Image (cartoon, grey):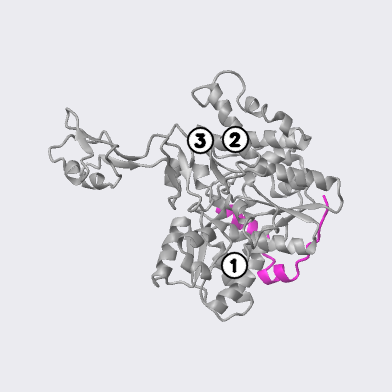
Amino acid sequence: MKTKNFDTKVQDLKYRVLKEVAKYAWEGTLIDHVLDIPNIIVPGKKPTMRCCVYKEKAIAAERVKLAMGGNPNNPNIIEVIDIACDDCPTGGFHVTDACRGCLAHRCEEACRLNAIYFDENRRAHIDKSKCVECGQCAKSCFYNAIISFKRPCEASCKINAISMSEDKTARINNDDCIACGACSYQCPFGAIMDKSFIINVIDFIKKSENNTKYKVYAIVAPSIAGQFRYAKLGQVVAGLKKIGFFSVVEVALGADMVAYLESQELAKKGFLTSSCCPAFVSYVEKKFPNLKQYVSHNLSPMGTIAKYIKETDPTSKIVFIGPCTAKKAEIKRDEVKGLVDVVMTFEELQALIDSKDIDLTTLEDDVLDNASYYGRIFARSGGVSDAVKQAIKEQNIEFEVKPEVCNGIEACRLALIKKNNNKLDANFIEGMACVGGCIGGAGNVTHSIINASEVDKYGRQALEKNITTAVSVYDLNVKSK
């Protein structure tokens, strides 16, 4: 059966663990089979990925724990599997083969700690016990023979929340981490993963099957466009209902609501930053606390649509499905707590679908038609700004929106520094922690650059609606599975 289209084999490995956990959770025999799953993931006696099969199975057992919710004593939803984090070379400055053994020895002169020494061929080396990674040696070398190397997880973390422990395994500083998941996606050994709550989703659905007053809603992020390319979007919606979800609602409708209200807030206050990206909001709070006052008071699109559904149907349980690991942290925030019950990524959704042996390609198309074009393009960089501009126009508000579109956390940092120094020529910061916006989220099945065009294409299918229409005439119109 044609199923997944992951970018990497690491994602595929994570998927296989999640699928097995979900399969036994559906059967109600997970506890009985927890010890069996590593043997299913790593069959036989010959290693395929590590030095020995015993280590492979030990790592698989740790993956199973994360698939079942991870360490309850660690508040972060991103965790390091220590036993899997040992194959990357140590980071820091290194002398390469480009070193010519020159006579000048500028690198030696530049090092104040005498960490540079030379072999019999006059080639430079660095004494790591003395080096403090200042980089002066690299700057002084005209041959560019000294380079700085960072482990992929460190390099991917643009807020410097990852360091190396004494045993050379990665350590995440929870005080700095914004749960964006970039390290998880970039780690080539799958040693960093987000906790999964897929068994909670299954538990909700199983309970709903025995209780007609207990309904489980799937609220789906607009970045789903282009994720499951082997099937049509309508077939994915049908698959969600076949799994057991009572109804499937677009988070893009929540985005319409946010754009409508955020435009009013922006015009009233004169300056605002978006609130849709939880990693960006967390970054502002942790690194620029004096700018927290400018973060929009509106809930994110996820929180907004969930609040609407909860008010409409108090019996509901709500599962957000999207690309974002930081959403798993967002639902713990006071303003969101109780609105969204579980967050699941698109990676996890693929595992959930296959754990039920559902072939999406055989299903008839269902409809996902709740939002406007502008709500749907929240999924890509620039979409929030476009939607806020449109909402200003539709409401005839006399205010010129001058957005600073921040594509990735580094761009966010630069904009926030400019605002701090009164040098930002903008009145609205669109903050997206992931490059590309939500389409670059760590929990995506695929991170292809064409996903932006897929989101726009998906948005154009709803062009007959503007934001005002989507918000004012919307009727939940629940359809049971």
Which residue is identified by label 3?
82
Horizontal and vertical percent position of residue 289: 48, 65
Residue at 56% x, 59% y is 277
Which residue is identified by label 1?
387
User: How much space separates mark 1 and mark 2, taking CA atoms?
Assistant: 40 Å
User: How much space separates mark 3 and mark 2, taking CA atoms?
Assistant: 11 Å
Give me the disc on residue 211.
none
Q: Is residue 466 left or right of residue 145?
A: right
User: Within the image, what quadrant is residue 15 found in?
Assistant: top right
Give me the disc on residue 63.
2
Q: Is residue 58 above or below residue 172?
A: above
Secondary structure beneath dot 2 equals helix
Give the residue type that dot 2 points to: Arg
Horizontal and vertical percent position of residue 372: 67, 64
User: Within the image, what quadrant is residue 199 found in?
Assistant: top right
Q: Is residue 34 above or below residue 274?
A: above
Is residue 473 highlighted in magenta? yes
Secondary structure beneath dot 1 equals helix
Q: Is residue 469 in view from this perspective? A: yes
Q: Which residues are magenta?
A: 452-481
The outermost residue toward the top is 45
Q: Is residue 243 left or right of residue 440?
A: right
The outermost residue toward the front is 73
